[in-house]
Image (cartoon, coloured by chain):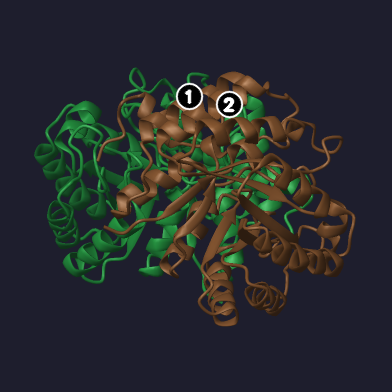
Chain colours: A green, B brown
Amino acid sequence: METVLLEDHSLRDGLQAEARILRLEDKLALFRLLAEAGFRQIQAASFVDPRVIPQMAQSEELIRSVLRDFPEVAVSALVLNARGLSRARACGVRHLSLSSSASDWHSRRNVGRSAAEAFDELLRMIGEARASGFAVQAGIQCAFGCVHEGPIPEERVAAMAKSLAEAGAPEINLADTTGMANPLLVRRLIRKVQEAAGETPLALHLHDTRGLGIANLLAAWECGVRRFDVSAGGLGGCPFVEGAAGNVAAEDVVHLFEQLGVATGIDLSRLCRAVRRYEELLGRRLPGRVCRVLATGVLGN
Amino acid sequence: METVLLEDHSLRDGLQAEARILRLEDKLALFRLLAEAGFRQIQAASFVDPRVIPQMAQSEELIRSVLRDFPEVAVSALVLNARGLSRARACGVRHLSLSSSASDWHSRRNVGRSAAEAFDELLRMIGEARASGFAVQAGIQCAFGCVHEGPIPEERVAAMAKSLAEAGAPEINLADTTGMANPLLVRRLIRKVQEAAGETPLALHLHDTRGLGIANLLAAWECGVRRFDVSAGGLGGCPFVEGAAGNVAAEDVVHLFEQLGVATGIDLSRLCRAVRRYEELLGRRLPGRVCRVLATGVLGN
């Protein structure tokens, strides 16, 4: 049976734009629900400035706690600069997501540096993190477009991927930060990146801003991508990209792969417990579909 | 440039399960917004028992009015039995959607007859409607699954399609009434139906119950289907299928085809006026994504 690896990002990308700051104990309970649903890769926090992203102020405590309580889960954290890398090292996390943006406008807005400067720092950090024994995934934000710059030249993304592979990145994540990908672009860009980055495996991080998230994911799967970031309930959005919606909903992706006969290792009804808990804590319905269907008992085949 | 034909179903399938009954003048204003957005095919009503579907009680008045005011639009109505056919004839509508279900359970629940009886009546009605000069589209409900019966044998759907083609149906609509399709099933079933029904063009009616609507639509497009039912805002659901969500959102489908370089004839910003009007009248946000993005001015490329 074919398998796919899903990494849940609801605690990091999902929560970072939420005005309601969740308590540490609630985040820990959510992590437990995600782990019990079967996730073996969970991105739990980012080491960014808590004055900018207040939801991430408890990253150290959260990471230390889940590293202790869930040895079976690969806990990852997002790091965007050297300060974040030293915080990550201090709290013992072993899996790092390091990334920079293909859009200069987005990079300046997100990290206050040009895309070229941020990419240089990314390459340095990859070397440093690998030398320190971290498991590293290197990411390219806005790989499929920027709301300000528009389409991003595919050659630029391919060249970045080539440099990341040459810098020793064991895996490259293409992020559709703005939800501007479409299935044809996904196929085209993945082929170009595969040519540029050789055997380095790809992962995709897809936002569902324009309703194309699942179609893009399927297009990538059919191009051989076997690792995707998802978010329970479809929670999320980028605080610096207006109108950005959440990642593809974990439960809808799990259901899709069940229909395709692909094993995810995730138990749908357990995953829906996490989604319901998010909805209770945040006081609103989340956009994912399948938990609502499961609740009526009519998921069908 | 390639083209695709989208028929909006928000006034019929979209509204039929809504508890809030819209006034005739509001429905007429919505029809006008849809026509101004560029729709040249609009399903405006169904001739069903208004005691069962109160939202459709004004079907005659609505149809007569839009036939008079919008000669450029092909106005269609859904008809499920002989009584509906005679009401359609009386009010002058020229485009009929006639259908029955591939699921016996769903047919008994929806029209109080077995699937076999309803299909026999469908074949009779196709002949009668064509003899009366109606433009007819023949539909197969629950073609991709039934929440009670589970998967529907593909051979059953193909055999129904063959009979419909032999009965002279100029077009066959496969309806995913329960949102149980997935892209692999879509490809498989469309190929089987194309083999069975020869040159008869196919249309698809997709519900987004499990978040796969757009991915299913793209799969069908890549199999050569060039006509789809959509619903402004993603409004809708079947009153007899618990947990059923609306049709694929018209605006998200239009945006997808724009990205693929396929002409729909629909103006997105005008379409969003219709979606906003639905949201005002119904007092809630609809699930379609693209109008929310357009409202923030960051649709991008």
Q: Which quadrant of the figure contains the C terminus of chain B?
A: top left
| CA–CA distance in space, label 1 to label 2 | 39 Å
Q: Amino acid at mark 2?
A: Leu
Q: Which quadrant of the figure contains the N terminus of chain B?
A: bottom left
Residue B6 screen position, x and y as percent: 47, 49
Say which chain tag 2 marks: B
Furthest residue to the bottom? Answer: B195
Residue A147 visible in this rendered orientation of the protein: yes
Q: Which residue is mark 1?
A: A18
Residue closest to the eye, B136 or A67? B136
Residue closest to the eye, B161 or B40? B40
Say which chain tag 1 marks: A
Residue A128 screen position, x and y as percent: 20, 49
| Quarter of image, res B161 | bottom right
Report the side of A221 relative to A11 (left or right). Answer: left
Q: Amino acid at mark 1?
A: Glu
| Quarter of image, res B179 | bottom right
Eyeballing the image, is A275 above or below A94? above
Q: Residue at x 67, y 58 (%)?
A: B132
Q: Which residue is mark 2?
A: B28
Classify mark 2: helix, strand or loop: helix
Eyeballing the image, is A237 above or below B249? above
Q: Residue at x 43, y 49 (%)?
A: A213
**Mark 1 touches mark 2? (CB < 8 Å):** no
Residue closest to the eye, B185 or A93? B185
Give the number of the disc on residue B173: none
Report the side of B23 relative to A226 (left or right). Answer: right
| Quarter of image, res A99 | top left
